[in-house]
Amino acid sequence: MSESMLNMWISFVGMGLLLLAMGLILLSRYKLKGVLSGIITLLAYLSLLSGAIIILYIVFSGPTA
């Protein structure tokens, strides 16, 4: 697998984590209450942070040969 294809799959994982974070935050705010809401919110923000780090890495790594 070439480096470009690997970067594409890594970016898909980052975008998926961002979408997961969005869904989990909406779920925890509107459907859940109590401790479970806090756990889901923590998981959502962790996936948001990791997705953002992945996307920033892909963007700032520059073009591939």
Image: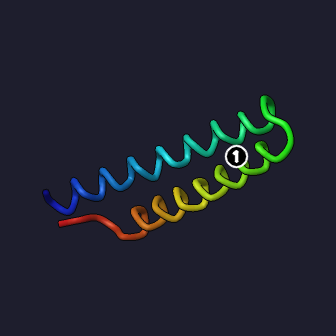
* Left or right, residue 31 beside residue 9: right
- Label 1: which residue? 40
> Seen in the image, is 16 located left or right of residue 12?
right
Percent across and percent down for residue 53 are 52, 65
User: From the viewer's perspective, is residue 14 above or below residue 30?
Assistant: below
Residue 50 location, quadrant = bottom right
Q: Position of residue 3 (x, y in %)?
A: 20, 63
The reply, left or right, for residue 3 in relation to residue 44 is: left
Task: Count up the numbered dots.
Answer: 1
Q: Quadrant of the N terminus?
A: bottom left
- Outermost residue to the bottom: 61
Q: Residue furthest left?
A: 1
Residue at the top extreme of this rendering: 31
Question: In the depicted view, which residue is nearer to us: 5 or 45?
Answer: 45
Extreme residue toward the front, this view = 35
Residue drawn 22% across the image and 58% down it: 4
Q: Nearer the viewer, residue 65 or 39?
A: 39
Position of the C terminus by quadrant: bottom left
* Left or right position of 47 against 3: right
Q: How is the image coloured?
A: rainbow
Please tell me whether residue 65 is drawn above or below residue 11 in the rendered image. Answer: below
Q: Decide which of 35, 45 is in the foreground and name it.
A: 35
Residue at position x 58%, y 54% in the image: 47
SS label for mark 1: helix
Please give the name of the residue rendered at 46% of the width and 62% of the height, measured from the top-left corner.
54
User: Label 1 amino acid?
Assistant: Ile
Label 1: few (<14), some or many (≥20) within 10 Å?
some
Identity of the residue drawn at 71% across and 42% down: 25
The quarter of the displayed image where residue 10 is located: bottom left
